[in-house]
């Protein structure tokens, strides 16, 4: 990718470690994530990639080190707090409400933005009704953006896997995140579906200005869409830089890529 300009560091890991019993999942990890960039975290299975995402959005709490988000050092963060503060994510295994249609699944991503209480929402009256209409307008824009208008009323359990992944992306976008965490967004997709998802990830970054952190095993995807790549191995950072720099790093070749590409 051509060199682009980014904003200030929006998220920083400073010597972050986390252990589960005797197992060190991350050891002394440090990196910065800058506004509006696309960062890929790669590494072999068990390298600590998903653990890093789980630390960012509050599923796990680090045992050592500091996480700084938008200029404030975080001590503890729960997932709902991360979501309220602008961090959304998708998952390696699609986590949708399979019995609900596309529109309603994406609507669940607006919950944190709804001000009406549950009683008024249940009555669907007055301010709650007006509020839901506005949220539905926002969701319809996301449906148009992701080109899934034809399945907006389709139960998601009946959709092909690639479209389910797109619906999950739409639900994350409904929260209007500043940072979007994508855990293997291309996993299980065929070539055409991967090309579509790459296009949407780039559009989210470019048109919506969203900072994106993704885990991905498909190296062609990583090298094509990432501005910067962070490489983990056995819970330690072994390389960081542009795709070109990382691809030529002998440590990365030995630990992960296997051959010079």
Image: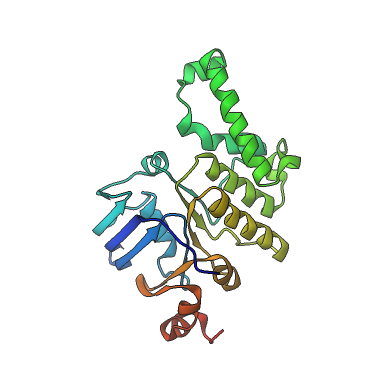
Q: Residue at x 56, y 84 (%)?
A: 261
Q: Position of residue 62 (x, y in %)?
A: 28, 56
Q: Position of residue 176 (x, y in %)?
A: 50, 41
Q: Is residue 80 left or right of residue 127?
A: left
Q: Position of residue 69 (x, y in %)?
A: 32, 50
Q: Residue at x 43, y 86 (%)?
A: 250
Viewer-closest of 112 and 58: 112
- Which corner quadrant holds the N terminus? bottom right
Q: Residue at x 45, y 47 (%)?
A: 178
Q: Is residue 15 left or right of residue 38?
A: left
Q: Is residue 118 left or right of residue 10?
A: right
Is residue 20 visible in the rendered image? The answer is no
Give above or below for 72 relative to 114. Answer: below
Q: Position of residue 195 (x, y in %)?
A: 68, 62
Which of the 4 image quadrants contains residue 189? Answer: bottom right
**In the image as oriented, which residue stretches furthest toward the top?**
126
Q: Is residue 17 left or right of residue 187?
A: left
């Amino acid at each position: 990718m051509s060199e682009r300009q980014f904003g200030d560091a929006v998220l920083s890991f400073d010597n972050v470690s986390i252990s589960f019993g005797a197992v060190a999942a991350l050891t002394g990890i440090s990196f910065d994530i800058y506004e509006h960039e696309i960062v890929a975290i790669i590494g072999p299975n068990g390298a600590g990639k998903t653990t890093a995402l789980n630390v960012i959005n509050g599923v796990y709490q680090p045992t050592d080190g500091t996480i700084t988000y938008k200029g404030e050092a975080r001590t503890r963060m729960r997932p709902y707090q991360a979501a309220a503060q602008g961090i959304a994510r998708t998952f390696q295994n699609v986590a949708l409400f399979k019995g609900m249609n596309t529109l309603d699944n994406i609507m669940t991503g607006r919950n944190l933005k709804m001000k009406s209480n549950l009683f008024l929402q249940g009555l669907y009256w007055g301010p709650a009704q007006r509020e839901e209409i506005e949220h539905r307008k926002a969701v319809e824009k996301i449906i148009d953006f992701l080109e899934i208008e034809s399945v907006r009323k389709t139960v998601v359990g009946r959709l092909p896997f690639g479209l389910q992944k797109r619906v999950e992306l739409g639900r994350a976008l409904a929260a209007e995140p500043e940072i979007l965490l994508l855990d293997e967004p291309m996993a299980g997709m065929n070539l055409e579906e991967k090309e579509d998802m790459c296009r949407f990830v780039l559009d989210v970054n470019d048109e919506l200005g969203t900072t994106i952190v993704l885990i991905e095993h498909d190296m062609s995807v990583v090298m094509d869409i990432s501005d910067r790549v962070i490489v983990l191995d056995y819970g330690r950072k072994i390389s960081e830089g542009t795709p070109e720099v990382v691809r030529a790093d002998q440590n990365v070749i030995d630990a992960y890529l296997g051959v010079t590409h």
